[in-house]
Image (cartoon, helix red, strand yellow):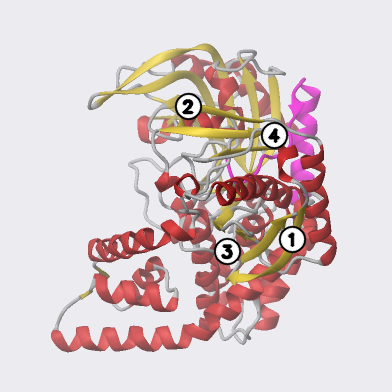
Amino acid sequence: MDSKKIRKVFLEFFKKKGHEIVPSSSLIPADPTVLFTSAGMQQFIPYLSGEVEPPYYRAASVQKCFRTSDIDKVGDESHHTFFEMLGNWSFGDYWKKEAIEWAIELLTSKFKIPISKIWVTVFKGEDKIPKDEEAIKIWQSYGIPKERIKEFGMEDNFWGPITEEGVCGPCSEIHYDRGEEFRVGKCSLSGCGPNCSCGRFVEIWNLVFMEYNREVKGETYEYTFLPAKNIDTGAGLERLAAVLQNKKSNFETDLFLPIIKEIEKISEINYDSQPKSYRIIADHIRASCFLIADGVLPSKEDRGYILRRILRRAIRYGNLIKTKKGFLIPLANLVIENYKEIYPELIQRKNDILTVIQQEEEKFEKTLQSSLKLFEKIVSKISQSGEKVISGEDAFHLYDTYGFPIELTEELALERGLTVDKDGFKQCFLKHQEISRVGSVKKFGGHDIESVKDEEARIKMTRLHTATHLLHSALRQVLGPHVQQAGSDINPERLRFDFTHPKKLTPEEIKKVEEIVNQKIKEGLEVKVEEMSYEKAIKSGALAFFKERYPKIVKVYSIGDFSKEICAGPHVKNTKELGQFKIIKEESCMANVRRIKAILI
């Protein structure tokens, strides 16, 4: 069964069971404390916690996910950065019996998996939370004998929360027995079964019985019951496809095989001789396409750093198998083509995806050989001294000068039997960050308009500052949500606004931005200000892009329903005070950052 049919069968099955089919949310979560969407349940947290009344009480989805914790594991048979999670949810509606019954029904009657191949795990009880006797009885009632039901503790059979506090609960994992021929290592358990490291068993679905909320109480956790019992399930599409297509690894399924074959065309080395390199490239190019489509651009921080890290890791492994320069572009085209029907944002953002990848590839290719030469010099120096550790200063020099991610340096070091002084690297990084922060005050709008003594100049700058908020929202409306403020500067004559975007704006785009801003000026929108905590501001939908600069209590400026940002002001009271907005210049500021200069007439 191919991957498209797996998605279709899953969603149609739960639709017939009364579930609302919910589209995948973005890889960029609404919760600012979390870097990426890493589980299908994240968009449903307000319903699961009881904070918000759900518009439906049963839901199913195929959710795009990204997990940073598995980057270093990519290269084996089953780990990924980007993956798709099939899931079904109950918000205070059905409970364990239905969740287990439908899981068995779907797997055996729709996916045609013999029940004899199914093993399950249950929560054995730990940390004052009792053993899940109820689940054991229900599994047995649906044909799973007791000898194929294994008990584990918190580490394996208790899911959540995503952060230190939040919704969670015991779970039952469904494992598939691939057979003796799939055993590649020694058994890590006394009796081989689920969670054994030998490779025979693979987890294909996790049913979470979400009934607790966890809170930190001093040095311990306290678990309290949620207002309602919820079901939260997740089945990784990649693993399920490997089982249903009878493949030894996820990378041999139809989700990856076209990419693998394309790399073989480009490379001088076949897949079987270098599977790790192929898998890393295939995984990372797919993940990169999805991250860029959701508005992430390469940078030195946060999400942008993760994107840069996986792109550069893919380039480095491409270098190992002697790929040609620009090899990521045909692979990205293939990813977009394969997924465009399911995730139309890929085709909508195709030009941006290809532009960003090409720019990053060209940029890193220019420095890759130089950085590898420097790395060899460092290794030679260490070998001569008899040391086994690359200093933090050397690792930071590779990062700061050549854009070499610290994790890539660690990977290269490990191949040579060396380690990296990460603490020393962090000290160098923090020192550099502090110097940059001091120097960025002016760059990021550090001008103090209220201190300007000339009244007329102060009024002009206040009008222009308000106009930057309208410009920001207009740019996001025309170009997409990936647009983020990257700096600003205002004087009495003009505003300068820097923003993330991978390519030059077209005349049509510039005209559209101008029209939107001028339309909002004509509408005479009221400018309102509220004071609240930073956390509340973010939850209310306010934009904020310089996290380290905000105090605990912030001001949020709203311009009608069009713009809402955390800002220190000052602003006009109504957009009618602005006059006419005109863009006088659009240019490159730095890699993936554009600059607009504009005036008010």
Report how far apart the C-alphas of labels 4 and 2 lie in the structure.
22 Å
Q: On screen, 16 above or below 27?
A: above
Amino acid found under the numbered disc labelled 2: Met
Secondary structure at badge 3 equals helix
On residue 583, the disc is 1
Q: Nearer the viewer, residue 568 or 48?
A: 568
Residue at mark 4? 574
Viewer-nearest of discs 1 and 4: 4
Q: Earlier in the sequence, mark 1 or mark 3?
A: 3
Residue at mark 2? 532
Q: On screen, 204 above or below 41?
A: below
Q: Quadrant of residue 92?
A: top right
Q: Residues within 10 Å of mark 4 (few under 14, many from 20)?
A: some
Residue at mark 3? 284
> For the point 68% across and 58% down, which residue is it?
253
Amino acid found under the numbered disc labelled 3: His
The region drawn magenta spans 3-29
Viewer-nearest of discs 1 and 2: 1
Report how far apart the C-alphas of labels 4 and 3 lie in the structure.
47 Å
Q: Nearer the viewer, residue 63 or 361?
A: 361
Q: Nearer the viewer, residue 16 or 389?
A: 389
Q: Where does residue 198 sit, x and y in percent of width and height?
A: 42, 52
